[in-house]
Amino acid sequence: MEKDKICKNAIQKWGIENQILKSVEELNELSSELIKYLNDKAFRNRKKVIAEIADAYVVLRQLEIMFGEDDCKKQVEKKLEKLEGIIQKGG
């Protein structure tokens, strides 16, 4: 099954509000795993970080679908252009 169809099916099955809450949960789990990765150099777990990145990717794609793909893509382009400007200025 195509990933966008899976994401749309999840939104349809559990609803927008539940998937927004799930997104918050998954993004917090990624944040927590990254903090653990930075703070505990002796026990860094790259696989756990990657698993949380994958979860975050899935919920971010659902958010993009829910809030408008075109608008999200335009904002991503603006943010990348801004980042490129900062990089070029040496900031």
Image (cartoon, rainbow, N blue to C red):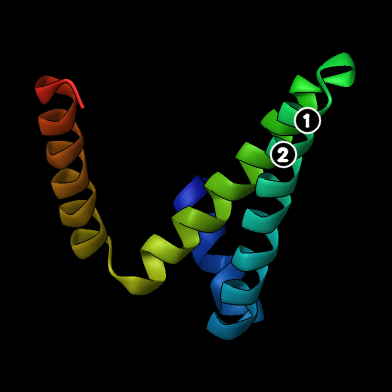
Q: Is residue 77 above or below residue 9?
A: above
Q: Position of residue 24 (x, y in %)?
A: 62, 66
Count of marks placed on residues: 2
Q: Are marks 1 and 2 in contact (CB under 8 Å)?
A: yes
Cα separation, mark 1 vs mark 2, equals: 6 Å
Estimate how packed mark 1 is, as few (under 14), some (14 to 19) or many (20 or more) residues with alpha carbons within 10 Å. few
Q: Is residue 17 above or below residue 25?
A: below
Outermost residue toward the top in this view = 42
Q: Is residue 66 above or below residue 83?
A: below
Q: Residue at x 84, y 26 (%)?
A: 40
On the image, numbered disc 2 is attached to which residue? 35
Q: Quadrant of the C terminus?
A: top left
Q: Position of residue 59 (x, y in %)?
A: 56, 57
Most foreground residue, 19 or 41: 41
Most foreground residue, 12 or 46: 46
Q: Residue at x 18, y 24 (%)?
A: 87
Q: Residue at x 50, y 45 (%)?
A: 2
Point out which mark residue 39 bears: 1
Q: Position of residue 37 (x, y in %)?
A: 75, 28
